[in-house]
Image (cartoon, rainbow, N blue to C red):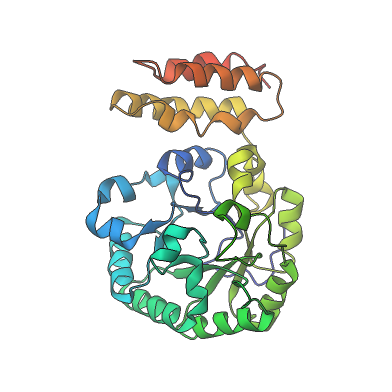
Amino acid sequence: MTFNFINQKPSGYPLSIAPMMDLTDRHFRYFMRQITRHTLLYTEMITTAAIQYGDRSKLLDFSPEEKPLSLQLGGDSPQELAECTVIAEDLGYDEVNLNVGCPSNRVQSGNFGVCLMAQPGLVANCVEAMQKRVHIPVTVKHRIGIDECDRYEDLANFVRIVSETGCQRFIVHARKAWLRGLSPKENRTLPPLRYDDVYRLKKQFPQLSIEINGGIITLEKIKQHLRFVDGVMIGRAAYNNPYLFATVDRDIYGEIVTPLTRHEIIERMFPYIDYWSNNGLKLHSISRHLLAIFGGIPGTKAWKQYINENTHLPGADVKVIEKALTKIIRE
């Protein structure tokens, strides 16, 4: 039975995989696209300065198969963010997301990420400038609060101010962030989850698409949250258990499809791995994303061990993955 989503917007996505630094690169996204066709994928957070002055091709290129795809930007300059949003649209990204949730020291020193929650007017200016230049959606990912500014009223005020620009979609990590005293890793786990605040936000702003993020690791929990909000974003669970998404095209998006087995997913990666290996990419750049696919399956330890011991060797190519796959009993 197809799941019924609350007030689902035509331009929204009931399920997405969060932007994660050093994890959600193009190779991980291509891998996940073998598992789910419809889940919205994100790039890692990329700063406006990196796009303006760095290797734009390395940072922004993607395979068409990765779509639908959102570019997450980090920055606090309306003009620079607008310019990078235009670049994203020209390259074919489906939307651009503004990072107002990352608590790392590097992000804070640059005055962007979660510290921008203290400046809703600046965020609104950024979003307005971005929206004026493109036709693709501009969305905002943020926390429920920062430091002592963590009342529900503060969260609602932030969303109200930013939404007055016309922004329609807000992805809310249901934890506050401490700008001092906690590491980025601790900020992902220690502040308590407050899902009810996100549900309340949806009730107060029924015209907006509100998505929830934080601590969600099962399909059943995804479905439970979708009774109260428009979308669910999965973070580390997607990387640590990618096969969690094996049935979402059927169970969440209502597509009539038979989920692939884990073996079939890896086998579908062979041509991709072969292409990149023949073009000089080190096998580890792709294989590291595949390690967790057999979690809980007999042979997974041998699978990981063989890959880890052989992908760094000179000339390592798709044959390493083919051999590693023999360590797992076929489903």
Question: Looking at the image, which residue is at 59% across and 51% down?
Answer: 185
- 83 relative position to 162: left or right: left
Q: In this rendering, does residue 321 appear at all? A: yes
Q: Nearer the viewer, residue 75 or 14?
A: 75
- 250 relative position to 265: left or right: right
Q: Nearer the viewer, residue 155 or 247?
A: 155
Question: Looking at the image, which residue is at 63% across and 71% down?
Answer: 144
Question: Looking at the image, which residue is at 71% across and 20% down?
Answer: 298
Residue lying farthest to the front in this orientation:
181
Res 253 → quadrant: bottom right
Q: Work out whether 82 lies above or below 310.
A: below
Q: Work out whether 245 lies above or below 4.
A: above
Q: Nearer the viewer, residue 16 or 54?
A: 54
Q: Quadrant of the C terminus?
A: top right
Q: Work out whether 121 lies above or below 77.
A: below
Question: Looking at the image, which residue is at 58% across and 85% down?
Answer: 157
Q: Give the percent coordinates (x, y) of residue 183.
A: 57, 55
Residue lying farthest to the left in this orientation:
53
Q: Give the percent coordinates (x, y) of residue 122.
A: 42, 80
Res 314 → quadrant: top left
Res 109 → quadrant: bottom left
Q: Give the percent coordinates (x, y) of residue 100.
A: 49, 68
Q: Give the percent coordinates (x, y) of residue 1.
A: 75, 53
Q: In this rendering, does residue 17 appear at all? A: no
| Image label count | 0
